[in-house]
Image (cartoon, rainbow, N blue to C red):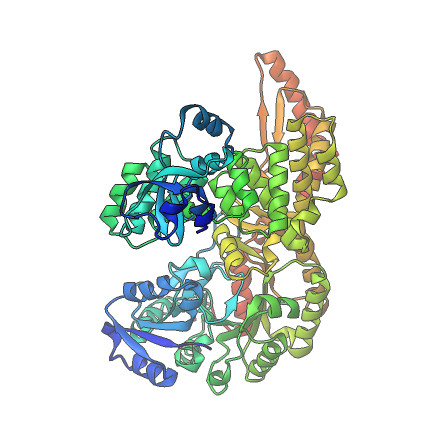
Amino acid sequence: MRISKLFINRQVADHPTTRSVQSRLNVPSESVQNAQQVYATISRAADPVQQGKEILYLTRNKGAFLKKCPGTSHYTCCDYQILHIGTFCYMDCTYCILQTYFHPPILQYFVNHDDLMTELDQVLSQKKILRIGTGEFTDSLIWELWTDVSNLLVQRFATQNHAVLELKTKTTAIEQLENLAHNRKTIVAWSLNTKHIISTEERATASLSARFKAAARCESWGYPLAFHFDPLIIYDGCEEDYTEVIAELFSQVSADNIVWISLGTLRFPSSVKTVIQNRFPDSKIIYEEFITGPDGKMRYFKALRIKIYRKIIACIREYAPDAAVYLCMENDEIWRKSLGFIPADVGGLPHMLDASAVKHCNLKPGG
Amino acid sequence: MDSKSSDNQNVFKDAPLDPARSLQTVLLADIDSADTTFRITTRKELDNLVLSIQKLGLMHTPVLKYNPPGYSIVCGFRRIAACRNLGWTRIPARVLRKNTGFFEMARLAVADNALQRPLNLIETSRALKLLTEVDTEKEVLVAAAAELGIPLSPAIVPKLKKICDLSRPIQKAILANVIDLSMALALDRFNAVDGQALLGLFDHLKLGLNRQRELLLLLKEISQREEIPIQQLMTEKPLNHILENTKIDRSIKRQKVRTYLRRRRFPMISKAETQYNAFVKQLKLGPNINLMPPKDFEGMTYTLTIRFDNRKELKNLKEKLEKIILHPGFIKILDG
């Protein structure tokens, strides 16, 4: 964590959450009229992306807190709901698409939890099976040191039986989760990668062994788990390295307690390539064989994707033959050639994941 | 100043020429031609100028700045060099007043060149750099630049100003029209050896900007991926073999180099393309059927184009299409 300054929107200056973050962070703060003032500060920096990671902007989310996962056309999306608690991340992964997703990228936290909870209550009252996560526009647990948002959410989800909350992270900031009554309605999930990729491409993230240790602790506290091999990055020796990660994973946690495992190969808008070249000139991940998919994103040539998916899926199946393994943003051809079936064969990807959530998190559809 | 070597020893012995006087006779030995602060021209050849001065005399007097103990040139670098070549020892020159400002001298230097002929990219760069060297009121600068035909758009100025500081080989390539402004700036990001190797390739193949960009990207990305200097990549046997082949036409050579580098950069995609082309060849589709794979083989949407003039032709094509549908190779492509 390297937050050096706090910007506070005047409208939320007196909000209790603002005060709480302010006292926990203990860094210089500046009151601003609007986000433009913060953007101006960031844009003036030589590396606005880096600058955006070092300041924190506390404000109100004026839009919806719950959003559909943006997905992209032509590829199968899991129909996840995003709970929009904040944006961006202080960790610094070379491949992170958030570097160009927000203009400019800015570490921003929404303090109006009352509005968040009202909206969440409305959605949860529909009693539909829902998978909701906070780890799409940010890392779910980077906020743990300064906020109580996970605490709030875990306890709210624990009071109902048809929706699960997924907290997706590359950190080990799990301490606040220990004594919460979660009722298995919160899935704690980790993004996994090889030691090589973590050390070269995922700056300021927890080590692989630390992630496993944290996962094992969460399991011991009764939480269901999930893992995301995303992005899978191809390099010489990557298959052996991923095989090692999988072996390590199943030596640390129980296969039966894993709600789902997603796989997704590296993909990014072309704008991210330029950012990687400028910010991480030593990174080689963008020089594999990429094509531009029909959604405009760059992704590995399909033969490369199929090869690595097959290898990893076979390896996972050795340890967890029944685990819900799915591909993130892939088309039917890749599904069929990698997993041996297409989502439609199992009622669609959302149905497949809902069923796994029902099974592992004791959801009661309509309940 | 070596006044002893002067023909006019008595005049120059004790005091330098009055810098306030505009037209003076100045000893060539007192002019510092190495000070190129105000040099705009990139032209170095003097033969024509020497001939002209020899026949008609020095029609336009150079402009000098008094720079004790001698003089620096503001306008007339080539004229002064030509006079030296002719063995002259002194020339008439307009010496600027001591209090002439840098911006005023810059304007004179630029005008002396820009008002006679169109400036090339490097000369424009030098002119721009000179005019913006000192803080000048924006309005004055804009007026001066407009008067002299120098572009001042905010997007182009920083790029143009860099040009005159680029390495000599890059500047030379600009002057020889081998590369343009954007490529010059792109090449400046490479080390000297790689930059020179790329310049050599562009010159050898006489590539247009788009092709230069394409090859540059391929070479750069292979080099980054494999940690091989570009210069070393270009000495690889297959590429060298193409480049040194004197029997093939330059356009074929360009195509071969492009194909080689593309294969080198994208081996799997190139292999898939080769396999697909071989498969299509096997189908013997003829000139009236075209079967296109999805772009980059992503997805499963193939495009089939058929051309026919009458029902009989269409019927023939139908039979061919049925053969394609049942062809084991095609089934393998579609079903994996």
B318 and A5: which is toward the camera: A5
Q: Is residue B284 above or below residue B31?
A: above
Please report the residue visible at 40 percent of the width from the left and 27 percent of the height from the top: B57
Please report the residue visible at 56 percent of the width from the left and 74 percent of the height from the top: A225
Quarter the C terminus of chain A occupies: bottom left
Q: Can residue B90 be seen in this view?
A: yes
Please report the residue visible at 68 percent of the width from the left and 69 percent of the height from the top: A246
Where on the picture, by quarter, is residue B335? top right
The location of residue A80, given as percent across then percent down, is: 46, 62
Q: Is residue B221 visible?
A: no
The location of residue B107, given as percent across then percent down, is: 31, 43
The location of residue B227, given as percent across then percent down, is: 67, 56
Q: In screen coordinates, is A7 left or right of A208?
A: left
Q: In screen coordinates, is B217 left or right of B152?
A: right
Most extreme residue toward the front, as rendered? B10
B61 and B284: which is toward the camera: B61
Q: In screen coordinates, is A281 left or right of A155?
A: right
Q: Is residue B1 above or below residue B89?
A: below
Figure disc tally: 0
The location of residue B125, given as percent across then percent down, is: 41, 43
Q: Is residue A338 above or below residue A131?
A: above
Where on the picture, by quarter, is residue A317? bottom right
Where on the picture, by quarter, is residue A148? bottom left
A133 and A12: which is toward the camera: A12
A95 and B31: which is toward the camera: B31
Q: In screen coordinates, is A4 left or right of A291?
A: left
